[in-house]
């Protein structure tokens, strides 16, 4: 395809998107250009089409879904990996379209095959839950989570850790669970912090360590994890791994109830 023809097609797509936005009554299109490129809205009205479409999907700007979908579809058809990932996400979540896990898997798999770790993670979730499938496929989910783990995805570390904890799709291995959850928790994953605290509390997959148990449960609790708040309250009430302390117990219970001092 000649560059002239390609530019004409790109201009046609942009003009159609602008028309959709005007019909929707949105004010996100900036009709100016920067370095010869048409720019879109967003926080500073200086976003290129794909970045703008991603912004719309991330921020759930429903009025702009039709135009964003047009951008993503066009870019995905051209083989742009990020567009393929976001288009898969759109179909999985039903953002501006009916939920379609077959199409979600198709687009996410295209992105995953090119090394997109986010696509691997979300595909793993789909296979783990069995969305759009006859039944869940935890072993396939584990393979996909492992891909994302290699890219440092703390969400995938947590999910894969749980699979090893439960022997779901993989051979049960609490030592591997501990390693994965420790990395995920250190990365700031609140659920991993909560479960890691319990591993230290019970000595599952690692040495029992009350001090580390309280540290990780407290970390999850102060980040808003209600289960960790209640568990800490119970521990201080019963003197479980800590000295009995009614005031400390009530502090955690109040936090779980949304009360502040």
Image: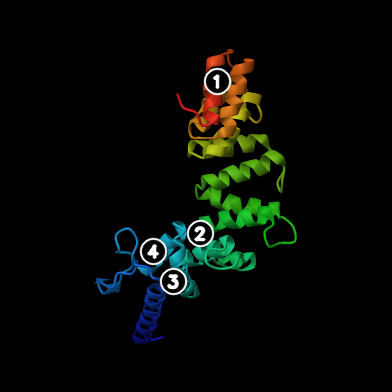
Please tell me which of labels 1 and 2 falls first in the chain.
Answer: 2
Tell me how far mark 4 sits from mark 3, CA to CA. Answer: 13 Å
At 40% from the left edge and 67% from the top edge, which residue is drawn? 50
- What residue occupies the far right of the structure in this picture? 134
At 51% from the left edge and 63% from the top edge, which residue is drawn? 85
Image coordinates of residue 165 in percent, x first then y, are 68, 38
At 37% from the left edge and 74% from the top edge, which residue is drawn? 22
Q: Is residue 10 left or right of residue 142?
A: left
Tell me how far mark 3 sits from mark 2, CA to CA. Answer: 24 Å
Tell me how far mark 1 sits from mark 3, CA to CA. Answer: 51 Å
Q: Residues within 10 Å of mark 4 (few under 14, many from 20)?
A: some
Disc number lying in front (4 or 3):
3
Disc number lying in front (4 or 2):
4
Q: Are marks 4 and 1 in contact (CB under 8 Å)?
A: no
Please tell me which of labels 3 and 2 falls first in the chain.
Answer: 3
The numbered mark at residue 67 is 3
Q: Which residue is mark 2?
A: 116
Please tell me which of labels 1 and 3 falls first in the chain.
Answer: 3
Q: Which residue is mark 1?
A: 250
Q: Which residue is mark 4?
A: 51
Disc number lying in front (1 or 2):
1
Q: Is residue 175 left or right of residue 20?
A: right
* On screen, residue 41 above or below 184: below
Say which element carries label 3: helix
Is residue 50 visible in this depiction of the protein? yes
Please tell me which of labels 4 and 2 falls first in the chain.
Answer: 4
Q: Are marks 4 and 3 in contact (CB under 8 Å)?
A: no
Q: Residues within 10 Å of mark 3 (few under 14, many from 20)?
A: many
């Amino acid at each position: 395809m000649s560059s002239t023809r390609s530019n004409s097609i790109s201009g046609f797509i942009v003009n159609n998107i602008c028309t959709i936005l005007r019909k929707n009554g949105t004010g996100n299109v900036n009709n100016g250009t920067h370095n010869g490129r048409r720019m879109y809205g967003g926080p500073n009205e200086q976003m290129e089409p794909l970045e703008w479409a991603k912004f719309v999907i991330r921020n759930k700007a429903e009025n702009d879904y039709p135009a964003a979908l047009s951008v993503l579809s066009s870019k995905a058809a051209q083989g742009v990996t990020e567009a393929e990932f976001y288009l898969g996400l759109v179909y999985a979540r039903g953002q501006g379209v009916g939920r379609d896990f077959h199409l979600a898997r198709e687009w996410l798999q295209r992105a995953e095959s090119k090394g997109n770790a986010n696509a691997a993670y979300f595909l793993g979730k789909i296979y783990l839950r069995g969305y759009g499938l006859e039944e869940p496929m935890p072993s396939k989910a584990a393979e996909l989570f492992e891909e994302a783990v290699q890219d440092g995805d703390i969400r995938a570390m947590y999910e894969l850790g749980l699979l090893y904890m439960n022997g779901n799709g993989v051979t049960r291995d609490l030592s591997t669970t501990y390693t994965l959850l420790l990395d995920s928790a250190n990365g700031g994953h609140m659920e991993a912090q909560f479960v890691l605290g319990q591993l230290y509390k019970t000595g599952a997959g690692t040495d029992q360590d009350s001090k580390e148990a309280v540290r990780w449960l407290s970390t999850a609790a102060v980040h808003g994890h209600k289960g960790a708040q209640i568990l800490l309250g119970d521990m201080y009430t019963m003197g479980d791994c800590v000295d009995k302390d009614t005031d400390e117990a009530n502090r955690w219970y109040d936090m779980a109830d949304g009360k502040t001092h």
